[in-house]
Structures are given as structure tokens and as C-alpha cells.
Image (tube, rainbow, N blue to C red):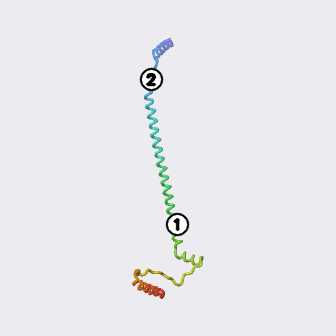
């Protein structure tokens, strides 16, 4: 008897609770808006990431160019030092005397400009020529 009553109670419940459920209608517009929002956020994130990568790459390139410039500066300084050594008069003199067989001259002759300009007039030509001769004779004596 007890079992019969439980069956009656449960049987009534199942019949009363059986409700037909309707599936909710899918909101296509809302889904499209959400998809567009997610795609827009993904595009912004990709843009920011690519921009950051470009900035980092430019930084590495800058460091590399600075190190190359520093190396070239050092090399330039070494080359300037080598040029100074090669231009030294003692080195040139030793090469000229030992390798090329040159000798240092005993007498040195220099040409000097006269202090007064000679004018091409007929009267001054004789005077200028005599001045020139006396000047040359004075240089010969020295």
C-alpha cells in the first residue's frame, strides 16, 4: 500500500511538470556585433605588437650603427697616426739617404723677391738692372 501511494504521487508529478520548452531565438545582430568587436580588438593588439617589434628592431639597429661608427672612428685615428709617422721628416730623410742614395747638398741657393718692384721705364731700366746685378752679387758672396 505504501508503494502504491508513492507511485500515485510520483506519477502525478511527472505529468504536471512536463512542460514543452521553446529554444530561445538566436540574436544574429548581437552575435555579429560581438564578432566585430573581438576582431577589432585582435587587430588593435596585432598593430600594437607589430609597432613595438618595429621600435625594438630600430633600437637594435641604432646600437649596431653606433658600434660601427665607434669602430670606424678608432680606425680613422689609427690611420691618422700612421700618416703622421709616414710624413715625419726623419723617416723621409733616412729613406732618401739609405734607400735612394740621395745626399744632403753642401750649398743651398734661395731665390728672394726684390723688395722694390722694377718699373719698365727706360730710365729706371738701367737703374733697376744695376740694382739687380748688385743684389745678385751680394747673394753670391753669401
Q: 120 or 73: which is nearer to us?
A: 120
* Front of the two marks 2 and 1: 1
Image spot of residue 57 (x, y percent): 49, 49
Q: Residues within 10 Å of mark 1 (few under 14, many from 20)?
A: few
Q: In this rendering, is residue 12 above or below 67?
A: above
Residue 100 at what x, y percent from top left? 59, 76
In front: 114, or 69? 114
Identify the residue shown where x is 50% and y is 66%: 77
* Above or below for 66 versus 139: above
Secondary structure beneath dot 2 equals loop
Instruction: Read off the residue under disc 2.
Output: 25
Where residue 124 sits: x, y (%)? 40, 84
Mark 2 or 1, nearer chain start: 2
Q: Residue at x 41, y 85 (%)?
A: 127
Q: How many marks?
A: 2
Q: Nearer the viewer, residue 123 or 34?
A: 123
SS at mark 1 in the image: helix
Q: Is residue 61 left or right of residue 102?
A: left
Per the image, the residue denoted by label 1 is 79
Tell me: residue 14, above or below residue 66.
Answer: above
Neighbours of disc 2 within 10 Å: few (<14), some (14-19), many (20+): few
Q: Residue at x 48, y 51 (%)?
A: 58
In whole angstroms, how far apart are the C-alphas of marks 2 and 1?
83 Å
Amino acid at each position: 500500500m505504501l508503494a502504491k501511494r508513492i507511485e500515485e504521487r510520483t506519477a502525478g508529478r511527472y505529468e504536471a511538470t512536463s512542460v514543452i520548452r521553446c529554444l530561445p531565438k538566436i540574436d544574429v545582430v548581437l552575435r555579429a556585433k560581438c564578432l566585430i568587436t573581438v576582431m577589432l580588438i585582435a587587430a588593435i593588439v596585432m598593430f600594437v605588437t607589430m609597432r613595438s617589434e618595429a621600435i625594438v628592431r630600430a633600437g637594435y639597429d641604432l646600437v649596431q650603427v653606433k658600434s660601427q661608427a665607434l669602430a670606424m672612428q678608432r680606425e680613422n685615428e689609427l690611420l691618422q697616426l700612421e700618416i703622421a709617422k709616414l710624413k715625419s721628416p726623419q723617416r723621409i730623410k733616412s729613406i732618401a739617404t739609405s734607400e735612394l742614395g740621395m745626399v744632403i747638398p753642401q750649398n743651398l741657393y734661395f731665390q728672394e723677391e726684390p723688395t722694390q718692384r722694377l718699373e719698365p721705364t727706360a730710365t729706371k731700366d738701367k737703374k733697376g738692372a744695376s740694382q739687380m746685378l748688385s743684389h745678385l752679387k751680394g747673394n753670391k758672396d753669401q
